[in-house]
Image (spheres, grey):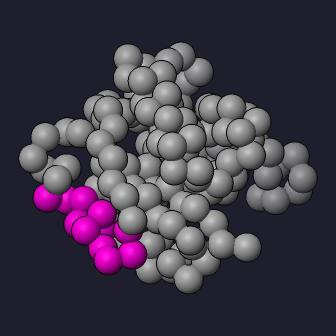
Amino acid sequence: MKINLLIPDAESPMSYYVILGMKDLCRKIVTAIPDVGISSRVQAFSSCSRYVHKRYRVVSIEDGWMGRALDKEKRKNEEIFINEIIDICKREKINVIYPSRNYTLFFLSKHVNRFNDMNITIPIEKHSVLMNVINKYEIIMQAKKVGID
């Protein structure tokens, strides 16, 4: 079964490698480019790949992500971003979203259930799991509980 793939952060250099690695599995590849001015257009070279069928602009969620993506509170543009991604998924019949940047991964992880309800696969864990992984102190405590020193 061929998939319809959305890469929601095409300004990431890693997104180009995602495209190259997934192209043979895809019927269609769609990219979303966060609108952060001219730099996003220059950096989004992966969207210019011959394997990309369609490109969309979306609101940026990058600004200051580390301080707020990790908590459960929503950022100013988060709901707008999620709604734009959902709209693209419906319009393009997307069934797989593959984030290639940390901040996109964290934001999508908060909403993974919304996408699962739409039969859209995102290869990430739930937000609570990611929070445990990023909390180094908590990882050390869990490791000690199971006998790893």
Q: Residue at x 62, y 32 (%)?
A: 110
Q: In the image shown, does 136 or 5 lie closer to the viewer?
A: 5
Q: Is residue 107 magenta?
A: no
Quarter of image, res 67: top left
Magenta extent: 42-52
Q: In the image shown, does 5 or 109 lie closer to the viewer?
A: 5
Q: Residue furthest left?
A: 38
In the image: residue 109, left or right of residue 46: right
Looking at the picture, does residue 62 appear above or below residue 8? above
In the image: residue 71, left or right of residue 112: left
Q: Residue at x 63, y 32 (%)?
A: 111
Q: In the image shown, does 65 or 141 lie closer to the viewer?
A: 65
Looking at the picture, does residue 83 appear above or below residue 25? above
Q: Is residue 16 visible?
A: yes
Q: Residue at x 42, y 24 (%)?
A: 80
Where residue 78 appears, x then y in whole percent?
Answer: 44, 25
Q: In the image shown, does 122 or 128 lie closer to the viewer?
A: 122
Count of number-bearing discs: 0
Looking at the picture, does residue 13 appear above or below residue 58? below
Looking at the picture, does residue 124 appear above or below residue 29? above
Q: Is residue 98 visible?
A: no
Where residue 72 appears, x then y in whole percent?
Answer: 59, 21
Q: Residue furthest right?
A: 146
Where residue 119 appears, x then y in whole percent?
Answer: 74, 46
**The N terminus appears in which quarter of the rendering?**
bottom right
Q: Is residue 51 magenta?
A: yes
Q: Residue at x 61, y 77 (%)?
A: 25
**The C terminus appears in which quarter of the rendering?**
bottom right
Where residue 4 appears, x then y in whole percent?
Answer: 58, 61
Quarter of image, res 148: bottom right
